[in-house]
Image (cartoon, grey):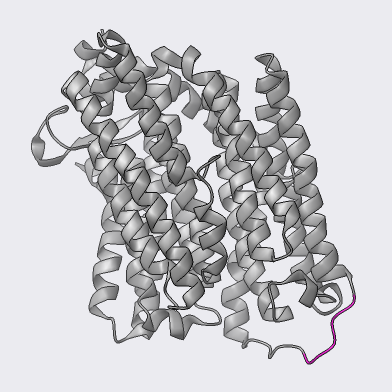
Amino acid sequence: MTAQLLLVAPLLAPLLGAALTALLWRRPAVQRPISLAATVLLLGAAVGLLAHTASHGTLVGAMGAWPAPFGIVLVVDVFSAIMLVITGVMAVAVALYAMGPGAAERDRAGFHPLFQGLLLGVAGAFATGDLFNLYVWFEVMLIASFGLLVLDRTREQIDGGLRYVLLNLVGTTFFLLAVGLLLGLTGTLNMADLARLAPDVDNQGALAAAAMLLLVAFGAKAAVFPLFNWLPAAYHTASMPVAAIFAALLTKVGVYAIIRVFTLIFAHDAAFFGPILAVVAMATMVTGVFGAAAHYDVRRILSFHIISQIGYMLVGVALMTPLAIAGSILYVIHHIVVKANLFLIAGAIRQAGGSFALARLGGLWVTRPLLGLLFLVPALSLAGMPPLSGFWGKLAVVRASLEAQSWVLAAVALAVGVLTLFSMIKIWNEAFWKAAPAGPPPAPPTRSQRLATFTPIVALAAITVTIGLWTEPFLALSFQAADGLLDRQAYIAAVLGPEAAR
């Protein structure tokens, strides 16, 4: 009973948080501690799930006592638990940061109920064991994320929000087409049951078509090449707490879905899909990093780097080796922390310098040296500089590519790392190193606002350094998650029973 309660707790915490903050719509000062408490509960439940799955294996819960594959099931293995833990970490960090400058305006617009709704959708997507319910959680995320994106109701936000919604609706259409095709071919949408039946489907061509439809649907959510245009058009318009949680989680749900589906349901056809995913990964890396190099707005640069880094995360499922998948998982952990922190720091740069445009910034190293040091930690980690977390993630991915004799994939990954460093140096030179532009500085934030701004930034920088200097336990956990993904029979047995895995 305790394990089953632990299984649903990551869903109950944001659900309760959304309900209570919505009821207290006219009392924003009360919403904030409730929202923060809900994120702390989410993190605590996720840590408990990770400890349970790491020591006892996959945890399965059948809703309404309907057994799989007939009923709705929640399935959390080590990979799912890792994603839930990192979701909780980001939720706490952003909830704290959102108490800083601009909190009153965001709260009046409904930030906290929408924020908790987004976390509910993300947690549901990571915990579900059913393709149709994955679609449902995607829709929950879409509704909440659109509300967060247009929170300030500016023309720029509405334009970016419409692009975001339109492309996601196209992805949703492909998702539903794939769901219908898979249901017709196999008679089930339970992922463990699909994994059991997929290799024996007579019409493997139709099954491959369903896989490609899912790749398009999940690729649109993950912003892979060529489905990424919505991201730089939308993310730079959002307020910084919203942009940070988007950068941390939204695209990673798409990456998670790709890894989960192609290691579980379509693993028997890896020889066909591997090269396709490798090409998509390389194209995503290259287009994203060139987009970042071409822009001079901090938010746009960081947005394009989200796209670029997604390519590294696809290497594992493209190569389908234990090292490659473990490297991708470690890279996902690193990137979520680093990218969210960079957006939080971008907000702090805007507070200190009065703009996101690099041409209007300067002199921050003199006036804000601590901010400069805090920027260097995630910036250098994103570029893969040792001994920070990004170095180990890229090392694992590149080594896996070399072991698989994917020389071009390894070369592209290394080259993109160099170009990423160029973009980070560009931000450093323009915002911190050059002379400050003429004009009065912006009004400084209050002490409580500075505390809300810098507490999560410092905490996330400390996590980045910790992963970099104490990599072994994180890499061991990534390998454990990778082994679980590659052991399809163990997943099938956990969900459907030992007889189904024979």
How many marks the image carries: the answer is 0
Residue at point 78% right, 45% down? Answer: 419
Asked where in the image residue 220 lies, by quadrant, the reply is top left
Answer above or below: position of 217 versus 68: below
Residue at point 71% right, 33% down? Answer: 413
Answer above or below: position of 113 versus 218: below
> Which SS type dominates the magenta stretch?
loop
> Where in the figure is residue 359, as x and y percent of width and height?
79, 73
The foreground one among 45 and 141 is 141
Residue range highlighted in magenta: 435-440
Asked where in the image residue 19 lies, by quadrant, the reply is bottom left
Asked where in the image residue 490 lies, by quadrant, the reply is top left
The foreground one among 249 and 306 is 306
Q: Point out the residue furthest to the left here.
A: 65
Tell me the quadrant of the picture where the C terminus can be found. top left
Answer above or below: position of 130 versus 35: above
The foreground one among 349 and 85 is 349
Residue at point 56% right, 75% down? Answer: 452
> Where in the figure is residue 289, as x and y percent of width and height?
70, 46
Q: Point out the residue furthest to the right here.
A: 435
> Where in the figure is residue 336, as x and y percent of width and height?
56, 49
> Where in the figure is residue 313, as x and y percent of width and height?
57, 35
Residue at point 60% right, 50% down? Answer: 306
Evaluate whether residue 129 shows in this view.
Answer: no
Answer above or below: position of 404 versus 263: above
